[in-house]
Image (cartoon, helix red, strand yellow):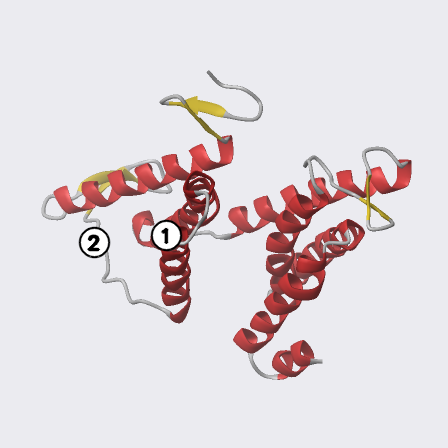
Amino acid sequence: PLTLTRISLLGRPVSPPEAVVWLAGAALLVNLLMIRMTRDTGVDMPTDDGTMRRVRLVYPRLRWTALDWGVAALLAVAALSVLAAQNLGVASHELRTVIVSGVLAYGVLRLAPPLTAGRGFDVWPAVWGIGLGAGLVAGGGLSQALTGSGLITAEGVLRVRGPYGSPNNLALYLSHALPILLAVAALANDQRKRLAAALLALLCAAALALTFSKGALLLGVPAAVLFLGFAAGGRWRWLALA
């Protein structure tokens, strides 16, 4: 049965975003199998003028990047940490929903470009999907601060939580989206993209600040900004350090 918050799959609750990620991974696997099965004969694909042409789908050899190794290391460390968990059930659930699903989503985006028959993979729909989703959630958090409804009092401050049960959950979500928007705002070649990303980043940063999440504000976001600065190099490295 499908609800607004979860899907029951084989008697286990699965969130809709997690289900989408696993379906995308299954679709990727099907495409890889199709490429392998049709590498000698090719397949008919439509062209821009509406006609069909025979295309040989060739999957290039994947070259591992430093980011690939980092994601693989994260998965390995997370999997090993489950062995030391006091509550194996909860740890396994978090491993699946947070780490494995995230790594699978990364893998889908990483492996998708060769499947477009030379047209290239357009990453911008994914970027703007993340950015607009985070902007809507951040806007909801800011509306809570303005109206005073749905706030949580903790450690003497009023904390926004958006659609989540805890301000830390909102902070975790926004701290994942904010570095992506900052990277686009700083490094994109198109001025309109930079401006749109900067506005969304400001919205997310404001809502993130009102969560008063120490982990996000003192560790998560600064570490992400530092990483982006060193990855971009040049003057961005020194700005990140500043």
Question: Quarter of the image holding residue 29?
Answer: top left
Counting labels gives 2
Nearer to us in this view, 181 or 219? 219
- Position of residue 10 in the picture relative to residue 99 (left or right): left
Residue 190 appears in the rendering: no
Number of residues whose C-alpha sits closer than 10 Å to that of mark 2, classed few (under 14), some (14–19) or many (20 or more): some
Q: Amino acid at mark 2?
A: Val
Using the image, tell me which numbered label, if any, was put on residue 58: 2
Q: Quadrant of the C terminus?
A: bottom right
**Place of residue 94 in the rendered image (x, y in percent of width and height, measured from the top left):** 47, 44
Question: Residue at label 1?
Answer: 83
Q: Secondary structure at mark 2?
A: loop
Given residues 140 and 12, the one toward you in this image is 12
**Which mark is in front, 1 or 2?**
1
Q: Residue at x 48, y 46 (%)?
A: 98
Give the Cα separation between the discs numbered 1 and 2.
Answer: 40 Å
List the single residue furthest toward the front. 86
Say which label, 1 or 2, has the lower sequence index: 2
* Horizontal side of residue 93 vs 232, given as left or right: left
Compared to residue 80, the image places residue 30 above or below, namely: above
